[in-house]
Image (tube, grey):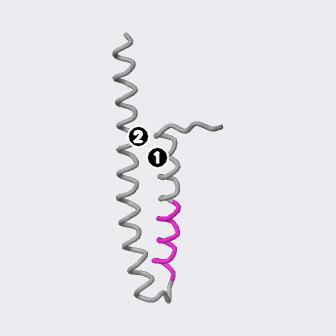
Amino acid sequence: MQVNNFANIAYNGIQKNFERLNENTQTIVTPQQSFDNTANALIDNRMAQKDIEALVKVIKTEDGLIGQLFDTWV
C-alpha cells in the first residue's frame, strides 16, 4: 500500500495541468483551427492556471503545517 501526502498529490496535479496547458497551446497555435476549438483551449488554459495556483497553495499549506509541527517539537 502506497501512502501519498498532500504535497505529492498536488505535485502530480500540477504536472497534469502543465500537460493540459501544453496540449491547449498546441491547439491554439495550430493554423486552421476553428474559433470554437481555439476559444475552448484558451478558456481551459485559464482553468488550468487556476488549478495550478490552488495546488501550489496546498503545497504551501502542508509545508507550513510541517514547520509548525517541528516548531512544537523543538
Residue 13 screen position, x and y as percent: 49, 52
- Secondary structure at badge 2 equals helix
Q: Is residue 43 above or below residue 13?
A: below
Residue 71 screen position, x and y as percent: 34, 16
Q: Residue at x 41, y 70 (%)?
A: 44
Q: Is residue 35 magenta?
A: no
Residue type beneath disc 1: Ala
Question: Is tag 2's residue or tag 1's residue first in the polypeptide sequence?
Answer: 1
**Most prominent secondary structure in the magenta stretch?**
helix
Who is closer to the viewer here, 5 or 54? 5
- Magenta stretch in the rendered image: 19-30
Residue 8 screen position, x and y as percent: 51, 41
Q: Residue at x 41, y 40 (%)?
A: 59
In the picture, the quarter occupied by the N terminus is top right
Residue 59 circle label: 2
Residue type beneath disc 2: Ile
Q: Residue at x 35, y 58 (%)?
A: 50
- Residue most extreme to the right: 1
The answer for how far apart the CA atoms under marks 2 and 1 are is: 7 Å
| Apparent side of residue 41 relative to residue 57 in the rendered image (left or right) | right
**CB under 8 Å between callouts 2 and 1?**
yes
Q: Is residue 42 above or below residue 5?
A: below
Q: Is residue 29 magenta?
A: yes
- Secondary structure at badge 1 equals helix
- Residue most extreme to the top: 74
Q: Quadrant of residue 58?
A: top left
User: Dot 2, crowdedness within 10 Å: few (<14), some or many (≥20)?
Assistant: some
- Residue most extreme to the front: 1
Who is closer to the viewer here, 38 or 13? 13
Q: Label 1: which residue? A: 10
Residue 69 screen position, x and y as percent: 38, 21
User: Dot 1, crowdedness within 10 Å: few (<14), some or many (≥20)?
Assistant: some
